[in-house]
Image (tube, rainbow, N blue to C red):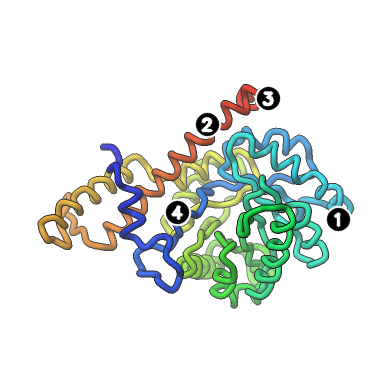
Amino acid sequence: MGLPSDAESVYEQSTGFGRPPGQHDGKAFMSVDLPIWRSLLYVPTHVEKFVATAATRGADAIILDLEDSVPPDQKAHARTLVQSAAERVACAGADVVVRINRPLALAVRDIEAAVGAGVAALSLPKIESAAHVQLLAEAVSEVEAERGLPQGHTRFVVLIESALGFTAIADIARASARVVAMALGGEDYARDLGMDASDETLLLPKQQLIQACAVARIMPLGTMGSIARLDDSEAYLALGHRSRRFGYVGSSCIHPRQVPLLNEAFTPTAEETAYAARVVEQAATAERTGKGAFVLDGKMIDSPIISRAKRLLAQQTAIETKKKTNHEQMRVSGNRSGVGAA
């Protein structure tokens, strides 16, 4: 069964997507203009062999890293590479995110190097207050103005990596309209608390982060656990499916083989999509007859289930649109440079 032709428009109207946080009606939490980032692949900006192949990996976003993966004596050089690397890794349609450094002096230099038409977002590490986000937003606004970019062009992915930052997640998530996603740096957070970074100890903090994102209507990124072996694809895929059930919408990763697994895990299945389409169609029929609830396959269907179905259909529509756009961009880039044949 195909998607209802008006699935996305009906979804936007009835789930509350796109409303300011203060008008949240509890039916959905993400804004309609949030990106599709099921997979975000880290790439060290200064390592040519990784930059050269990044566009072929199929990630929804490429994170050009200026932080942990770049040695201190290489950071200045890495900054000079950002804009050219951004153009290269985006040639197959991936959005480009640049992870900057935390010390303010380094962050300012990173912002000056990174902000540009080809960079969709900055990843902000070690955020501990809303004021810190706002300070960085002000710096970005100045650079955007200098370069003739629309105000708000550059979005933020906020990384929470300390106990202090975690206590302020609700305020941080709503600190700026630039913030579109938030993630918990589990290892750093656990170290700050003096606890093991295990699935058990991080379960509650990750659920609380998902809730903070829901209130702010931004994307929670991450997984509900970790996998010891990079070559355990079956376990990693299962982790991705579990994470989606908890409310995550995507995750960063460090190895290319994880990209297709994340894309699969955070994409609604054909069965889920077909069932959601039936729910929406039956809901429309029920509404015409004055019914607020109905029975489908022996189960009672009411407003929360209908809203989830509409959200799922809109997500699937957005994913398919992104796939088509990326395929066309890869075809054009491949004809021009050979990337598509890699």
- Cα–Cα gap, marks 4 and 1: 36 Å
Of labels 4 and 1, the one closer to you: 1
Of the pair 219 and 243, the residue shown nearer to us: 219
Q: Residue at x 56, y 69 (%)?
A: 173
Of labels 1 and 3, the one closer to you: 3
- Specify the amino acid type for callout 3: Ser
Sort mark 1 into few (<14), some (14-19) or many (20+) by Cα contacts within 10 Å. Answer: few
Of labels 1 and 2, the one closer to you: 2
**Residue 337, disc:** 3
Q: Secondary structure at mark 4?
A: helix
- Cα–Cα gap, marks 1 and 3: 33 Å
Image quadrant occupied by the N terminus: top left
User: Is tag 3's residue or tag 4's residue first in the polypeptide sequence?
Assistant: 4
- Specify the amino acid type for callout 2: His
Q: Quadrant of residue 319?
A: top left
Residue located beneath label 2 in the image: 327
> Is residue 182 shown above or below 89?
below
Residue located beneath label 4 in the image: 244
Q: Is residue 295 left or right of residue 3?
A: left
User: Is tag 4's residue or tag 2's residue first in the polypeptide sequence?
Assistant: 4
- Cα–Cα gap, marks 3 and 2: 15 Å
- Cα–Cα gap, marks 4 and 2: 25 Å
Residue located beneath label 1 in the image: 72
Q: Are marks 3 and 4 in contact (CB under 8 Å)?
A: no
Q: Residue at x 64, y 46 (%)?
A: 96
Give the x, y percent position of residue 263. 50, 42
